[in-house]
Amino acid sequence: MKHIYILLIAGFSFFSSLEKTLAFEATPPFWSNQFSSSFPSGWTSSDLSGQGVEWEYCEEFFDCPPTSFSFIECNASRFQSPSVEDGYLFVNSLAAGNLPVPHEAVLTTPEIDCSSKDAVFLRFYTYISALNFNPRQHALVEVKAGTGDWQAFTAFPNLDISVAERRESWNPREVLLDISEVAANQPGVQIRWKWKGNGELFWAIDDVALFEQSPLLDRVIWGDQPGQGDFGNGLNGWAVSNVLDTCRWVWDAVGEVHFPDANPKADFWPCSPTAFNGVAMMNPTWCIAQGGPSQFTHSELRSPVIDLSSAGTGKRLSLNFFQAFMKGNAASVNFPLSSVMFSPDAGLSWPDTLALNVREAFSDPICGELSVSIPDVYVGASQFMFKFVFSGNSFFWIIDDVRILEKEDHDLGIVPSFVAAAPNFSTPAAMVGPVGFAVDLRNEGNAPQSQVLTRVAVKPDELAAPVFQDSLFVGELLPGAVYDNDFFAKQFTPPAEPGQYVIRYSVEAADADAVPENNSKDVHFRVSENFFSKDPGNCSINGFFAASEDLRYEIGNCYFVAKGEDYCASELEFSFRNASLLEGANLTIQLYQWKKNGNWGDVNNDTIANPDEYELLAFNTYQVNGLEDGSFVKVPLSFDSECVPLEDSTYYFVTVGYPEPVLINGLGVPFFIGASEEVDYTAMFWLSYHLGVPQYVSMLRLGNDDYFRANGWGLLRVPAIRMYVDQLNASLEPDPESKVSLKISPNPARDILRVDLSEKMSIVNGSLEIFDYCGHLLHSQGLESPFVSNLPVNIEGLPAGCYILRLVSENLTLQTRFVVQH
């Protein structure tokens, strides 16, 4: 029997990191500095050019580069070193401006005694962004012993503008250098970081450590020998197998990823410690553009046969490797884009598939080390194999430094795929409601963990004191066990004023944790001045997407309004691509209330907004001018009302529709709307059911369907569709008669539509009007009677599609939507 598991792994984003690198070392460093309090004693900073551009200490990352460079659009939120919150060192080249000659900022350690070390490895975390001088040649690590000469080591081998599009490193870049030739068995070793530049941006370093053996080899039971998993000078014993395609895994000497764009230089590169001797790479974006035979690629990179019979009985193992990865389109909904498969019998069978990178954001490049738990059934197998499988058409995957490790005894971690966020990323200050908390835990180690306790804290920012705290006692957690299906007892309601918040989940146990980097996880949310959103902002847009099932579709977000009285919905904001192709097209704007005829929300719990559960409150249209391409546009929700009154404790969803696709040469042009995958709402949705008020995310209607699928784009991808609210003016107070609604049947209809009022009342000088979604009046008929009851309306001449029916009179105006199907 085959099993497919979803393994949700954190990684590093090129511009903004999602998670911290996993650092595994059984042997601690013999010398280290985390820069946790101030500029370190005994270290020195200078500028060899005499212009005063020197290394500085950063106490709070908000005040230092890159965070302080707010003028850079979509700037990195912070340097992502493991211990960034307790300080780091940096050079601010930009602050110096254009100098007469280049600066040479130098940071030097005190003398370090390595006399008893036969080997010395230097590891540090760094992030550099240069503009003029190549970091490859000018941002160097130099080492000397005693009175000897300084010997240079390259920290950024790919950052050379002659071969790469940018001079910016991964954030962070984990640098591991073997400095044994200079430092081994030497008593007075010094290390310095030297940056020559002029008008650059910044260079930051943190968590510097020296080891007497490579930390890559700690607890390794396979992959420590040259040619096993380091891809040194070739694939060696690895094999490549493809399904109906010639685009495949290849060995590459430098691992530079090229996209088929106008710039011939590399777009991305690896971050593995041994990338200098080659990597395994899959780049279907390039292959297909160069004439690959099919739209999608399915290629397997198979390991040699590995003997695990000597692995310790009862010991848990992990597969560790470095990857650079950018999530694109999978070949099939039935198979992951990136995965690893395991075999106990030298590849005769592959019972287990672990989907990788599932929770990574679309088109957001990551780079770092991953750790995959090997199912216990394979421990002791003498014919063990595994294979990396890429199945899709974009974007790329680089793998290097593959090892099989024995897990640490004490490694308790938060499951990054199940961490409850707030129901919305942004909620207006006047409408804030309670936020609940839930998180899953996993014992990744080899030993039972006792006195396990998980905590949650809410802070105004990462460095501030908590404004809310709660804890949950778990007790004992056995090796490999997951603690789930539970949540914190307390909820937090933010003050009714704009502000930013960070939810920090953490876990602890009786024994010291060997991998503290996975002991906490942050989730952000915001109290806004006047809008709802599910996305974190314009810079969180990961891509532009269209419905795959139908060119005609309607997509939006659902917002639960806890406090709607005295407020109204005014505008909708969204972004889209292909504007030049869509010029002249009419997009529809809708506001719905998921409450109708006494029904409130999802009455039958089918996660569908059925026609008898919702009603249309307002609609408008937006005509594409062809210049929008990716920029946000804001549109009034109603073409005939300044603001639509809201109610307390009510679900609303705002949508953008594409009912009449543009045709070019007889082919329909898709409508691609901006969406974000930066916030995972999976745990939030589960938690909201247990708290009694389900909180939905996207809402999707396809073609002529008369229902909406809640969470139609899943719980990771959310359209960037925001709803703006205003305070209700006296002139906009709802009329008491507004409780009356139009009832129509059948819906969808073919030739005759019958109209009723939900309550019997007299209509004064009334008429019925039918509009298309572009706001064009298509039909009008006066009412012969002041009472509307089973009134027939002939719609036989209307083409299939969606329409607005409006009743207009001196004492009442009502509207609803109906669908024509032939």
Image (spheres, rainbow, N blue to C red):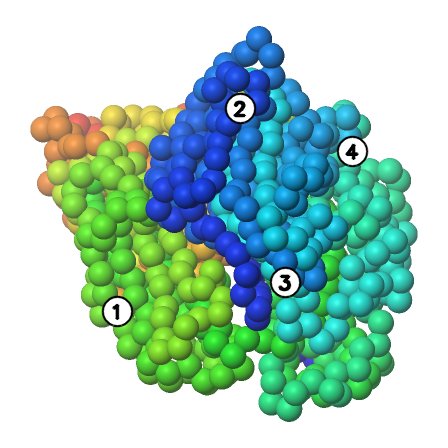
Element carrying mark 1: strand
In the rendered structure, the answer to whether residue 144 lies left or right of residue 735 reads right
For badge 1, the amino acid type reads: Ser
For badge 4, the amino acid type reads: Pro
| Picture coordinates of residue 354, whole percent (x, y) | 65, 69
Frontmost of labels 2 and 3 is 3
Element carrying mark 2: strand
Mark 2 or 1, nearer chain start: 2
CA distance separating discs 4 and 3: 52 Å
Quadrant assignment for the N terminus = bottom right
In the rendered structure, the answer to whether residue 173 lies left or right of residue 422 reads right
Which residue does the image show at 42% across and 43% down from the upper left? 40
CA distance separating discs 1 and 4: 51 Å
Frontmost of labels 2 and 1 is 2
Tell me the residue that label 3 is attached to.
116
In the drawing, what numbered circle is on residue 47? Answer: 2
